[in-house]
Image: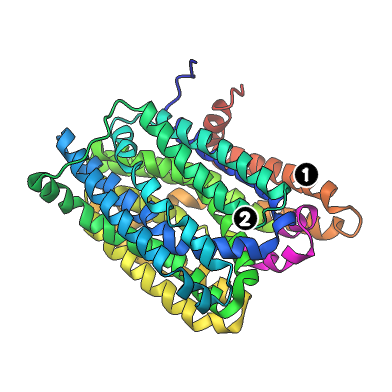
């Protein structure tokens, strides 16, 4: 089967858009059936078993990408190490399942955690081929394996949901998705699955892997440890509401920022010795990121009440305000993602790790301080973390990459202005019409109004960006 010749960014974007749209459709069916408690339990489990998938996998991938002259021995060494560590993590999760169930006061947590202890080993096997495809800017295999695995795993999860398996539908959905993803990726890349150990290769890789491992551990911890704290203070149901709010935020970031970040991390390497071209390239990255992220963050917050009432039942309404807070306070992530891409492009993994440490400390302090005061206070504290660490990120990039702080603010100002005006208009119309129109009718009206308003404003503030965006979809 032939696929269209798309750019690396387009493949990553296609994968991300498919993943998130499919996840939304799947969640739209599963959420009313399973309720917030089931998703809260899975959130707790993923804190324990997700470390290998997120942290170890990305550290391995980053190290293999950073090596200038790669050889098979590098891949074999990393395969061996990550599989061994993943086995240890899986055994730890399996052995600690009963204790975790007692701590969180839910007996069903133990068998779920034991079953999902298989995930670390399954996910670890995908690290080497993932790095190989990224090195060569071949993002098509990554996109295809992600879409295929999500589709198959989602169908399995949906069937189990509708046939009364409860939270176990989400468990098997996760396992099938990761297993299919790993198999499809190995079939799609010209890389053999080998194991071995080379001391020289390990030393080369460790130089890049260590700071990235620290950075990803801290980044993962800043996102996952609050879930543990919320689960302890608030219980699985409120954790499920928080999980929905953070999931909506993650969807926005994954669709608008992650694809450009993944490609920019590699593309920006060519400008390491040319500050003028680097600033121009970074400005374009910021415009592209903010031009998509800001309207979705602001517009998403503006329509969130209507979305919840059109989509979910009353069990989920407690997540409306947390969702609005999470989306609005995601705006600083544009700067954070662009800064991270530049630091990695300059092989400044240690600087990125230091930034992650600061962000993690800030997050934990805020969450621990505010979690006892309820879901709204805890969500606000969690959502503030990118805003509080924003000045430090800009300063580090200015020092390490010779990029001026003014660039970050000037590049994003027009898109932020357009998004804020659009958000005010949409909110005003929502408040005026919601007593008269049912939510299922009002929601598409607000979405169309927001899209039209933002396009009009962008045609005046950044016409080149709007033309380029429309051209991607074949507009004339």
Is residue 277 part of the magenta span, yes or no?
no
Residue corresponding to mark 1: 444
Q: Nearer the viewer, residue 157 or 265?
A: 157
At x 74%, y 45%, the residue is 449
Position of residue 129 measured from the top left corner of the image (x, y, whole percent): 32, 36
Which circle, 1 or 2, is nearer the viewer? 1
Q: How many marks?
A: 2
Residue 185 as seen in the image, left or right of residue 435: left
Residue corresponding to mark 2: 298
Is residue 317 part of the magenta span, yes or no?
yes
Position of residue 192 measured from the top left corner of the image (x, y, whole percent): 26, 30
Q: Which mark is residue 172?
A: none
Q: Nearer the viewer, residue 29 or 348?
A: 29
Please state the extent of the stretch shown in magenta in the rendering.
304-324
Instruction: Tell me the distance, in whole angstroms, between the alpha carbons under discs 1 and 2.
Output: 16 Å
At x 78%, y 49%, the residue is 443
Residue 46 as seen in the image, left or right of residue 209: right
Q: Nearer the viewer, residue 343 or 426?
A: 343
Relative to 36, is 208 above or below? above
Residue 425 as seen in the image, left or right of residue 281: right
At x 39%, y 33%, the residue is 185
Q: Mostly what secondary structure, the magenta segment? A: helix
């Amino acid at each position: 089967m032939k696929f269209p010749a798309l750019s690396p960014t387009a493949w990553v974007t296609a994968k991300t858009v498919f993943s998130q749209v499919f996840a939304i459709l799947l969640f739209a069916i599963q959420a009313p059936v399973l309720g917030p408690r089931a998703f809260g339990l899975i959130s707790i489990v993923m804190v324990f078993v997700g470390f290998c998938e997120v942290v170890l996998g990305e550290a391995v991938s980053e190290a293999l990408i950073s090596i200038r002259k790669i050889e098979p021995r590098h891949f074999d060494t990393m395969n061996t190490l990550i599989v061994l560590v993943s086995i240890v993590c899986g055994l730890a999760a399996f052995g600690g399942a009963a204790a975790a169930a007692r701590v969180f006061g839910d007996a069903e947590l133990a068998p779920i955690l034991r079953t999902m202890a298989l995930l670390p080993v399954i996910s670890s096997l995908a690290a080497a081929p993932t790095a190989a495809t990224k090195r060569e800017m071949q993002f098509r295999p990554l996109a295809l394996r992600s879409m295929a695995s999500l589709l198959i795993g989602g169908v399995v999860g949906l069937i189990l949901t509708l046939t009364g398996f409860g939270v176990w539908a989400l468990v098997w959905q996760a396992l099938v998705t990761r297993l299919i993803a790993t198999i499809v990726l190995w079939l799609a890349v010209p890389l053999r699955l080998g194991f071995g150990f080379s001391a020289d290769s390990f030393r080369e890789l460790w130089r890049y892997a260590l700071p990235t491992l620290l950075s990803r551990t801290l980044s993962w911890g800043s996102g996952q440890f609050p879930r543990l704290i919320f689960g302890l203070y608030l219980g699985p149901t409120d954790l499920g509401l928080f999980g929905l709010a953070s999931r909506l935020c993650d969807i926005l970031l994954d669709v608008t920022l992650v694809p450009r970040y993944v490609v920019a991390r590699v593309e920006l390497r060519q400008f390491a010795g040319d500050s003028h071209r680097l600033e121009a390239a970074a400005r374009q990255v910021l415009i592209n990121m903010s031009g998509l992220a800001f309207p979705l963050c602001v517009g998403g917050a503006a329509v969130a009440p209507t979305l919840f009432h059109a989509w979910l039942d009353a069990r989920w309404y407690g997540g409306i305000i947390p969702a609005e807070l999470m989306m609005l306070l995601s705006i600083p992530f544009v700067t954070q993602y662009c800064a991270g891409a530049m630091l990695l492009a300059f092989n400044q993994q240690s600087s990125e790790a230091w930034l992650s440490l600061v962000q993690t400390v800030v997050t934990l302090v805020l969450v621990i301080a505010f979690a006892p005061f309820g879901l709204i206070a805890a969500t606000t504290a969690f959502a503030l973390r990118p805003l509080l660490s924003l000045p430090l990120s800009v300063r580090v990039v200015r020092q390490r990459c010779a990029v001026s702080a003014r660039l970050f603010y000037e590049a994003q100002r027009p898109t932020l202005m357009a998004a804020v005006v659009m958000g005010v208009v949409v909110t005003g119309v929502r408040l005026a019409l919601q007593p008269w129109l049912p939510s299922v009718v009002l929601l598409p009206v607000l979405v169309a109004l927001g899209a039209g308003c933002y396009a009009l404003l962008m045609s005046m503030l950044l016409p080149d960006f709007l033309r380029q965006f429309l051209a991607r979809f074949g507009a004339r």
